Amino acid sequence: MSDADPGPGRGQETPAARQLVLLDLDGTVYEAGVLVPGAAEALAALRADGHVLRLCTNTDSQSTGGLLAWLQGMGLDARPGELFTPVTAARRLLGESDEARALLLVSRAVAAELGEACQVTLQSSPA
């Protein structure tokens, strides 16, 4: 076999193996409430290549739906199931037990989301 002939199946581009891609949001995908140039296109290219995306943030003051809507409003194709936050982690943990209870010191939207996963009693202070 010569250098000019790489042989059967060689020299052809093969698709990259499907991988899990973790993307931090603040400072990577957006900065100061504005998408980083090329971020939306990069996510689209990763999806097109078959990769699994997780958009990660430590934001715990917004519900998952509220954060998704905010990201989509910036022009990011953020999808349910891709967003991973402390709220989604807590919801999953609380949902694993029929006896889960929680004292929620969070916004009403987050409390409502977590309340779907466990038995909670919400008390609000006059404000």
Image (cartoon, grey):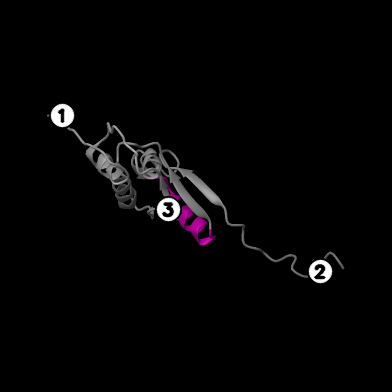
User: Which circle marks residue 40 in the picture?
Assistant: 3
Q: Which residue lies furthest to the left in this view?
A: 126
Q: Identify residue for label 1.
A: 125
The reply to whether the magenta stretch includes residue 99 is no
Q: In which quarter of the image is the N terminus?
A: bottom right
User: Which circle marks residue 7 in the picture?
Assistant: none
Q: Nearer the viewer, mark 2 or mark 1?
A: 1
Q: For residue 110, which quarter of the picture? A: top left
Of callouts 2 and 3, which one flags the residue occurring earlier in the amino acid sequence? Answer: 2
Residue at the spot 46% in from the left edge and 57% down from the top edge:
44
Q: What stretch is highlighted in magenta?
A: 35-50
Q: For residue 94, which quarter of the picture? A: top left
Q: Identify residue for label 2.
A: 5
Q: What residue type is labelled 3?
A: Ala
Residue at the spot 38% in from the left edge and 39% down from the top edge:
90
Measure the alpha-carbon separation of dots 3 and 1: 41 Å
Q: Are marks 3 and 1 in contact (CB under 8 Å)?
A: no
